[in-house]
Image: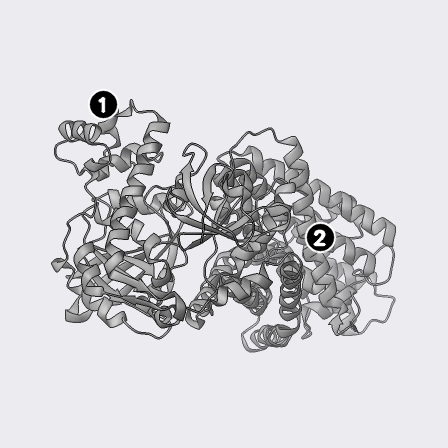
Amino acid sequence: MTLADLKRGQQGIITDVSSIHIPLKLLEMGCLPGNLVELVQVAPFADPMYLNINGTHLAIRKETAIHIIIETAHE
Amino acid sequence: MSKQINVALIGNPNTGKTSVFNALTGLNQKVGNYPGITVEKKEGICKLPRGVKAHIIDLPGTYSLNASSLDENVVIELLLNKNDKDYPDVAVVVSDVENLKRNLLLFTQIKDLKIPTILVINMADRMEYKGISLNLDHLEEELKTKIALVSTRKNKGIDKLKELIATHKELSVEPCLDASSIDKAYFDNLRKAFPNQLLYKLWLVITQDVNFGKTDRTTFDKVEDFKTKSKADLKRLQQKETIKRYQFINETLKEGQSIDLKSAKDLRIKLDRILTHKVWGYLIFGIILLTIFQAIYDWSSIPMDFIDSSFASLSEWTKNTLPEGAFTNLLAEGIISGLGGIVIFIPQIAFLFLFISILEESGYMSRVVFLMDRIMRRFGLSGKSVVPLISGTACAIPAIMATRNIESWKERLITILVTPFTTCSARLPVYLIIIALVIPEGRVLGLSYQALTLMLLYLIGFGAAVGSAWILNKILKIKSKSFFVVEMPNYKLPLFKNVALTVLEKTKAFVFGAGKIILAISIVLWFLASYGPGDDFNNAENIVTEEYASESLSQIELEQKIASHKLEHSFIGIAGHAIEPAIRPLGYDWKIGIAIVSSFAAREVFVGTLATIYSVGSDEEETIKNRMAGEVNPILGGPLFNFASGISLLLFYAFAMQCMSTLAIVKKETNSWKWPMYQLVIMSAFAYLVALIAFQVLK
């Protein structure tokens, strides 16, 4: 599944990012394989998405989120 | 000047870097531009222990040395160029205790440039609240640096920081990451080709798309081997580098930092639940905007009335005190009236910047970006366009510069093109005086009609911006990839010092920037209005006296007739009459025409121009507003500024592109005269049309 499939409040672990589609800036802000990601809030139409990646809070668009592959985290 | 050292303040956005800068320099700071580009350059002087003086540069906030915008380029260009006069003797990296992990990424990059580096861990007052504890000794050892734990809010740790800067010679310059571990074969090659260069520096020069001027770039062009890696390959290596850096940071923080999540409190979650809510979020944003406009209107009216009457008396006093003559007239009627036209807007501009800087400082502006992105995208804009559009209410110039962090070129271009529609502070003077003349006083639901009109004008400005963006989005055929990454910082109570300094600095920029133009134009206008060609002007006394010889006019009435005859036949009167046919259908006379023409230099000139024109020949103490209220329409009779012509004038100013500085900045940011010329012609033609329709319908 991708980050775009996450529901509000759900968490996941990033397993892969397609580096061609993802700006370096996002990687540098912590969007890297192995890191925990939580969907904090969504704007209307689930876009953009307000995330907590590895302690950094940021918002990205859905079109970027579909290039970030995740696994759901089990508590 | 014997012992002055260069200090560069570097840090991620939202780390309180500017607070640290303000704490170090206080009022000893100035804001300028980097040569050739319009990136703001903040620098200041700080006295250190042991008689050392530090020249401190507050570099633009950046997340990493891999620059993705013009502002970020400034940082890397300075750090790579040892010959730059501002090249730092010591770098101070400011980090936020709550985002230490991410902030350290930039820190490790700077360390790898072998620049002596001090780490500031800011917002230390939040540690207990967030359940964070730090092992500073461990961190200093692992990061090979000295750390100052600072709280600008509580004014703690600044002395320690000053001490560390003064003793910067003791800092280690050992790097954090061995660059060659990114890709051994590749970097070994690089080392062989450039044995005397720092590997990481070479790597930065290779991977950056920026022009580094003299910095080593030319040497690469000779050795083509190092450009053979494809862009995608280079990016993969950059990703690997980033992962390596985070591995190092995680390792360091494992023992250096512990967070007790149980004792952590999070106000952010509670606030965000409301402020970014699908319904409440938008409602609250609307209420905030409404409050701002009501406040600008109501709160600043008292100081404005005071300034208005003070300048009128000052002009009167000058005339009565100094000996009669051309110089006295120039001073009283040209310069003092012109100055009054600038000073009167200080209260409103200060209030506007007060609110904008509070919204920025508190972290709320990012929530607005988040809320608005989807809506703005429908019009070809980005959520980040909201910041330029809102700061456009202050001035289009910084607003257009603020578009630089919009990643997509198409979204950015559209934002640049439509931003001048938002109601900038230069329109405010025009709006205020006309609203005061043609909109009745009175209130509905506690809001004054005049404030509501003003709010409506702001909405019209936004509407025009968004509407034209929608059209441009359909017309412009530009393919560009759009990335959208916005940090959502923690909510913070704005620091009084930061807000006050921003207000002071922006108001100063308005007074001295716009003020110079206004003053110059006022003086020119005074000359044009005080002198004229031919007999009609120079012999006005005789002509008028003869003409009215049969009527028994009082001395004052006669003088007024002479003055108005003179004005009509002065240079400015002749020019005004020449354009009158074009503007008469809009409900304006030739005097307004002059004001409109001169406001193509800058809109705020409008009021100053009318002040200059109207005060010529008048001996009575009168304020500009009263003078305008007394004007009579020469053709239709009745007051010149009535509801129809007032609305027409308001709409003309709402849409017309009247600002040379904006055109210049658009040219600079789009790198072509094409876009500013389109703006000038299309916006002004549209303004004329709307004003024409409004007057013809309402009259």
Identity of the amino acid at label 2?
Ile
Label 1 belongs to which residue? Answer: B222
The picture places residue B421, in percent across and down from the top left corner, at 64, 48
Q: How many marks?
A: 2
Asked if B619 appears above or below B55 in the picture, the reply is: below
The picture places residue B180, in percent across and down from the top left corner, at 19, 36
Depth check, front residue: B313 or B176 = B176
Q: Residue at x 41, y 58 (%)?
A: B14
Label 2 belongs to which residue? Answer: B460
The picture places residue B460, in percent across and down from the top left corner, at 71, 52
Q: On the picture, is B97 further left or further right than B543?
A: left
Q: Residue at x 62, y 65 (%)?
A: B288
Q: Quadrant of the N terminus of chain B?
A: bottom left
| Precedes in sequence: disc 1 or disc 2 | 1
Identity of the amino acid at label 1?
Lys
Depth check, front residue: B653 or B82 = B82
* Camera sees residue B614: yes
Q: On the picture, is A39 further left or further right than B635?
A: left
Residue A5 - label:
none
Q: Secondary structure at mark 2?
A: helix
